[in-house]
C-alpha cells in the first residue's frame, strides 16, 4: 500500500505568507443554477430571471451570490480545513464580480496568520481566500480562520501572527456590479413593496417559514461545491453516527428563507462575519430571523446597501440569540453579518 | 419586530375582477430539464431528445409540459393558496405554446369567482391563471378553485359568483404547437408501437410500475417550482409531523409512470379537470392507471388527440376509483382528466 | 384492460444476430453535468473545468465518461434486463468519442450469445451495446451478459453460442480522444502530483473516504439515466421491502472516491470487466480501493494508460477481496477492471 492520498495539512504545515493553489477548477452554469433552486427555497428575483436581471442593468441573471461563495470555499477545504477542529470565523468577505453561467472558478488562499493554542495540540490558521474566474479576475475574497490539529504536539510553536480584522466592512468598501441600476425596479415582480428606506436600523424580522432538512439534500449540496470533508458524508466519521451538515448549507437555507420579509435584499456583496453557533443535523427544522444593523447609500443608481444580521435556528423563540452567560443558545445554528444591495 | 412578511391573502381579500401579478419570474433551462428527469421516470421521447423533437417538426425538445404547469402554478401559491384549506379543482387548462430552454416565465391570475361557504369561516375562490413568457405570449392558462380561510368570520359574505366551467375542453379548443407533425414519427425510438387508432374509448391500462417516494425528492421538486407552501417543507406545520407532498409531484410521477402503455401520448395540451383525492406522504408507493375517455382528430399532420383519465394510487387494486358511497377510495391519490397528442 | 405495457423479453425472445433498437434517445447537457457532480463527489479536473479540458487539448469539458456509460446502459434495460435475474459481467468496453453538452445519445444492442442454463429455467444472454450520437458516430460500446428467465420452462434450448471475450483490452485497442495532449498538464490544479510513472504494477491504494448512501440519491441517479428497473424504485418489488441500488451508482461513487490517490486518472477509456459482487442498499457506507494492474504508453502526447482494479466495499478491511473459498467477501460491492488515461 502506498500513500498517494491526501491526509490534509496540520498546523505545522502553515506559515504566514504561504500561497495555497487549490485544486480542481470548476465550470458552473445552468445546472448548478437549477440545483441551487431545488435545494433551497431561493426566490430573489435577480437570481431567478434573466429578464428581471436585465431590467436591473445586468446582461443576464448571474449565479446566486452564495453559489460563488460555496464553490470558492469548497476548493479550499482539502488544503485548509480537512483536519480542522472548528471553522471559527469569517471577515472582510467581498463579492467582486458576478459569476455568469459558463464561468470557470478556481481558488487561491494566502496564509495571513497562525497562532498556536495554549493546549499545545491545536492552533488557529487565518487565510485570505480568493475566487478567480477564467479571465483572471477576482470574483470574491474573504478571510476565514480555523482551528487545526497539530501533527506533533511537541513541534515548536510559531511566532504568533494575528491579522487585524475589522468587525465589518465599510459601505465604501463594497463593490457594486457593473451596470447595476435599480431605478426601474419592479417591486411587484420582486415580491415585496419594501424599499431600502422602509428598513430602520434595529428593526428585526421573523421570516416565519421553516424547512426540515434531509440527508440526501445536504450531501448533494455539499458535493456540488466539491467540498469533500468526510464529516458531511460518512456516518462512521463521528462517534454518534450522525453526518454534520456543511455550515454553508445552513447559510443558503437561511438566506433563502429570508426572502419572506427581505425579498428586495437582492444581492449579497459583503460578508462582515459569521459564526456557526451549533451543529445542524438532518431532521432539524431551520428557521431564520434578521436584524437590520446598518444602512448606507451607494454610488449606483437607485441602489442602497443594507447591513443585516441573519440568524438561523432549529427551534426556540425568534430573536433569542444568546443566553445569560453570553453564549449562543443551543438552538442557534448561525449568526451571519452581511451587506446586501436593495432598491432605494 | 415589524411585519414585512407575507401572511397570505384571506377570503375577504379576493374580489371578482381582481388581477394578481404574481412575483418572481423564472428563467428555466437545461438544469430544470435534467432535474425533471432525475425526479420523475420521464421517458416521453419528445421531451427527452432534441433530435426526436426535430423529427416531429419542432426546433428542439421543449421543457416537459408539466414543468410549464408547475412553474406557473408555483408562482401563484403565495397569492392564491397560502391560506388555502384545500385545492378543490382545475378546469379549462390549455398549453398554448411550448416552453423552450432559456424562456422566462411569469404568472398572472384573475379572480373569476368567489362564494362564501355556509359555515361562514371559509369561502371558495376561483382564479384563471396565465403563464406568460419573455415575449409576452401566453404559454398556459387554467382555472383552479381553492377553499380559503376568512380572516374574520364576521366579515360580510360577498355576492356569490360561480363561473360556468365546462366538464372538458372540446378537442377544437386545443392548441397544437406550431410545426408539430407526426407523419415521420419513429415508433421504435419512442418506445411503443401503439398509435392513436389503437386506443379505444373505455379502454383501461395498468401502468404496472411503482415508485416509493422520499422526502428529499418531493421537497426538491416543489422548491424547483418556487412553491413555498409550508406544509410541504416544515414538519411542525401539521399536527402529525408529516410533510404533505405537493399534489403536482403526484401528477408528474403518475404521468411519467404512464409511459408504460402510453409512451406515444407525447404532449399534454389540455387539462379538463383534476382532484387530489387523498394526501400523499413520503414512503407511499405511487402507481398509476389510465382510462381512455375520448379521441379526436386534429388539423396537424399525423397528430391525433386522446383524452385520458390518469389515476394515481398508493395501493389497492388497479382500476378501483370510488367506493359504494361514491367517494374516492382512500388509496386513490389523484384523478386527472387531460388531453394529449399522439401519432395517428 | 389491455396489455399495451412492456412486460420485458424472456430468454426465448433472444436469438444470436438480433438487433435491438433501444427506445428514448436522450439529449444530455449542463443539467446532467451538474447533477452528476451533486450525486457523486466527482473531482477529476478534466470533467470539472472547461479551462482545464482546453489546456489538455479538448474544445471543452466533456460529460463524465460514466454519464455516457449510464445513459447508454439505461436505454438497454427495458429490452435486455427487465427480466434479468443477474447482471453477470462486462467485457470489451471502449469509450470511442467524448460526449459533449447538447449531444443526443441512443443505444443499439446486438445479441452475440445465448446459452440455456442446466436448470432449464433461465439462460444467459450476451449483448454488445453501442451508444450512438446525433452524428451517427459511436461514443461507446461494450459487451454485457445477463441471466434472464425463460417465459416457458418447456421451451427448447437454443444452440449455445458463447462469445470468446478477452480478459482485458490491449492498450492498443484503446481510443484516445482527438486532440488529447497532457504535455502542459497542471498537476497543482488537478489536485495531486502523482504521474503515470509514479504508479507501479501491483501497487494498491486505499482511497480513505466513505459516503453513506441514501434512497433519494440513488433513485435520482438511476432515473437520470432513464433506467426503469423496478427493483431500484419500488419497495414492494423485493420480499424484504428494500430497494436494490443500481450497480452503476456504486461504480460512479467508487470512481469519484478514487480521486483521492488517483486524481490524475482523468478519463476512463476501457472497461475490461466487472462484477457487482453483492447488493448495495441505502444506509451502506461505500468505500473504495484500487490496484494497479498494468501500464502502457499511448500515441498521444504526454498521455499514458493505466489499468486499474477498482473495488467498492461497504465495510471490512481495505484490500480484502475474496474469502478462502474464492468467493467475494460479503462486504465487497464491486470489482471493476478498467483502463484510464493519465499524464506521463
Image: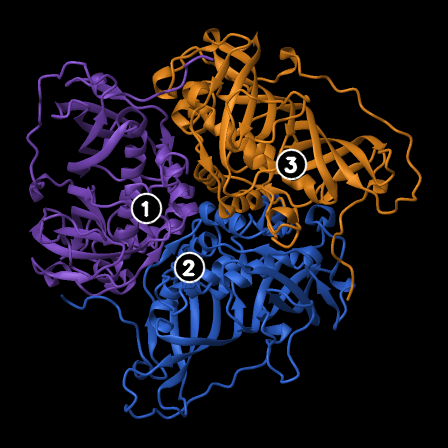
Chain colours: A orange, B purple, C blue
Q: Is residue B162 above or below residue C113?
A: above
Q: Which residue is mark 2?
A: C133
Q: Residues within 10 Å of mark 3 (few under 14, many from 20)?
A: many
Q: Tag 1, which secondary structure?
A: loop
Frontmost of labels 2 and 3 is 3
Q: Is residue C263 above or below residue B208?
A: above
The quarter in which the C terminus of chain C is drawn is bottom right
Q: Circle 3 is placed at which residue position? A: A73
Q: In percent of the image, x 34 and y 17: which residue is there? A: A188
Tag of residue B60: 1
Quote the CA–CA distance across marks 1 and 2: 16 Å
Q: Position of residue C192 (x, y in %)?
A: 73, 52
- Between B89 and C247, the one lying in front of the other is B89
Q: Residue furthest front?
A: A324
Q: CA distance from mark 2 to mark 3?
A: 37 Å
Q: Position of residue B329 (x, y in %)?
A: 18, 52
Q: Quadrant of residue A168?
A: top right
Which is more toward the observer, B30 or A128? A128
Chain holding disc 3: A
Q: Residues within 10 Å of mark 1 (few under 14, many from 20)?
A: some
Q: Left or right of C264: which side holds B301?
A: left
In this orientation, which residue lies closer to the viewer: B296 or A242? A242
Quarter of the image for residue B285 reads bottom left
Residue C147 point in image, percent of width and height = 41, 80
Please state if A94 lies on the left or on the right of B288 as rendered: right
Name the residue rendered at 19%, 54% in the picture: B182
| Rendered residue at 20%/30% (across/down) | B147
**Residue B116 in sight here:** yes
At horizontal 48% and vertical 37% (from top left) the residue drawn is A36
Q: Looking at the image, can residue A99 be seen?
A: no
Label 1 to label 3: alpha-carbon separation:
37 Å
The answer as to whether the residues below labels 1 and 3 share one chain is no
Amino acid at each position: 500500500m502506498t500513500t498517494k492520498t491526501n491526509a490534509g495539512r496540520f498546523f505545522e504545515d502553515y506559515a504566514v505568507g504561504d500561497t495555497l493553489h487549490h485544486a480542481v477548477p470548476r465550470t458552473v452554469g445552468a445546472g448548478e443554477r437549477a440545483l441551487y433552486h431545488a435545494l433551497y427555497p431561493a426566490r430573489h428575483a435577480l437570481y431567478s430571471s434573466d429578464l428581471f436581471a436585465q431590467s436591473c442593468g445586468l446582461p443576464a441573471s448571474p449565479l446566486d451570490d452564495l453559489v460563488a461563495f460555496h464553490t470558492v470555499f469548497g476548493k479550499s477545504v482539502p488544503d485548509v480545513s480537512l483536519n480542522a477542529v472548528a471553522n471559527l470565523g469569517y471577515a472582510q468577505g467581498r463579492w467582486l464580480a458576478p459569476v455568469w453561467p459558463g464561468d470557470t472558478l478556481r481558488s487561491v488562499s494566502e496564509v495571513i496568520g497562525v497562532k498556536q493554542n495554549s493546549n499545545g495540540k491545536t492552533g488557529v490558521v487565518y487565510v485570505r481566500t480568493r475566487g478567480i474566474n477564467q479571465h483572471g479576475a477576482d470574483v470574491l475574497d474573504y478571510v476565514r480562520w480555523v482551528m487545526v490539529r497539530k501533527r506533533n504536539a511537541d513541534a515548536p510553536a510559531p511566532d504568533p501572527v494575528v491579522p487585524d480584522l475589522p468587525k465589518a466592512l465599510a459601505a465604501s468598501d463594497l463593490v457594486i456590479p457593473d451596470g447595476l441600476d435599480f431605478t426601474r425596479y419592479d417591486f411587484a415582480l420582486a415580491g415585496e413593496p419594501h424599499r431600502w428606506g422602509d428598513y430602520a436600523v434595529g428593526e428585526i424580522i421573523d421570516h416565519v417559514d421553516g424547512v426540515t432538512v434531509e440527508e440526501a439534500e445536504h450531501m448533494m449540496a455539499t458535493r456540488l461545491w466539491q467540498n469533500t470533508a468526510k464529516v458531511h458524508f460518512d456516518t462512521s466519521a463521528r462517534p454518534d453516527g450522525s453526518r454534520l451538515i456543511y455550515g454553508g448549507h445552513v447559510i443558503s437555507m437561511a438566506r433563502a428563507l429570508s426572502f419572506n420579509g427581505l425579498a428586495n435584499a437582492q444581492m449579497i456583496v459583503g460578508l462582515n462575519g459569521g459564526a456557526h453557533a451549533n451543529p445542524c443535523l438532518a431532521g432539524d427544522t431551520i428557521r431564520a430571523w434578521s436584524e437590520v444593523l446598518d444602512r448606507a447609500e451607494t454610488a449606483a443608481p437607485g441602489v442602497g446597501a443594507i447591513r443585516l444580521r441573519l440568524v438561523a435556528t432549529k427551534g426556540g423563540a425568534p430573536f433569542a440569540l444568546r443566553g445569560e452567560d453570553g453564549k449562543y443558545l443551543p438552538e442557534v445554528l448561525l449568526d451571519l453579518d452581511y451587506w446586501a444591495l436593495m432598491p432605494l
